[in-house]
Amino acid sequence: MWNRLLTSLRPPPIGTAADLGIFLRERALLIAQKCAIDYVRGKTGLASYALFTEKPFLDALDVCRWETFAAVLGDLAILAEGVLRPGLPLQQHARARAALLRLHEEALTSLPPPAHRAEGWTGMTGAFAPRLEAACAGPPRQALEVADHSARRLFDTLPIHVNMRELDEPVIYGAVRFRMVAVRDEMRRRFAVAQLACALCA
């Protein structure tokens, strides 16, 4: 009975391109949302209840969450490539990279464009492509290294004046790194590497 309960509670393995796309999008949304809101609430304390009723603040927070989501999405794709690479023959690396770029674009375009990006995410995947290619050219990237890109985007767009948050930069970076490492570990547990690699290269 205990084993059946554990099986029912354990998330299923990720073995298709569609499942990988959903995973990357959901985890990117989670990291962006949690890191931004947790920091703001911790920084403003009891005043956060009033702050979260102010439209200018909410608009600025939306910008932060969306921009951080886009950054995290790319970083998670880089981590996914590193986890999958050992299961890929050398001649299939380029096809897997192209599949990850396609998933990156689909994840962005599957969501309604945010108010501050009325034109949508045009050009975002094109800008991400060189980063992914550079990551693929060297050893698989470590989560702590990759996370700093997303942490910088979060820090730069937080709806808290820079003079009030500048001393909190290590805290913000630490929060993003912590969650990025957790997602990387989840990738290692849940990726059906051989099956997923074949699906990406199909």
Image: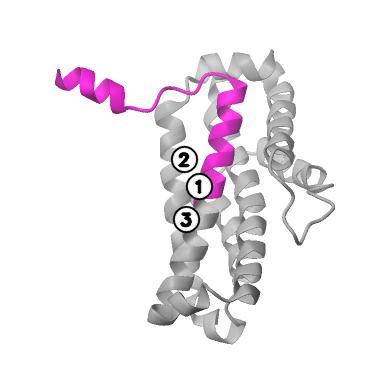
Q: Secondary structure at mark 3?
A: helix
Q: Earlier in the sequence, mark 2 or mark 1?
A: 1
As for residue 16 lying within the magenta part, the answer is yes
Q: Position of residue 90 (x, y in %)?
A: 67, 19
Q: Find out whether the residues at labels 3 and 1 contact each other: C-beta distance under 8 Å.
A: yes
| Along the line of sight, the residue nearer the viewer: 3 or 85 | 3
Q: Amino acid at mark 3?
A: Arg
Q: Which residue is mark 3?
A: 177
Q: Find out whether the residues at labels 2 and 3 contact each other: C-beta distance under 8 Å.
A: no
Q: Amino acid at mark 1?
A: Ala
Looking at the image, is 78 positioned above or below residue 83?
below
- Residue at coordinates 52% horizontally, 15% vertically from top-left? 194
Q: Secondary structure at mark 1?
A: helix
Tell me the magenta residue range: 1-30
Q: Find out whether the residues at labels 2 and 1 contact each other: C-beta distance under 8 Å.
A: yes
| Quadrant location of the N terminus in the rendered image | top left
Q: Give the number of the disc on residue 131.
A: none
Q: Which residue is mark 1?
A: 143
Q: Position of residue 138 (x, y in %)?
A: 65, 39
Looking at the image, is 41 positioned above or below residue 138?
below
| Quadrant location of the C terminus in the rendered image | top right
Q: Residues within 10 Å of mark 2 (few under 14, many from 20)?
A: some
Q: Residues within 10 Å of mark 3 (few under 14, many from 20)?
A: many
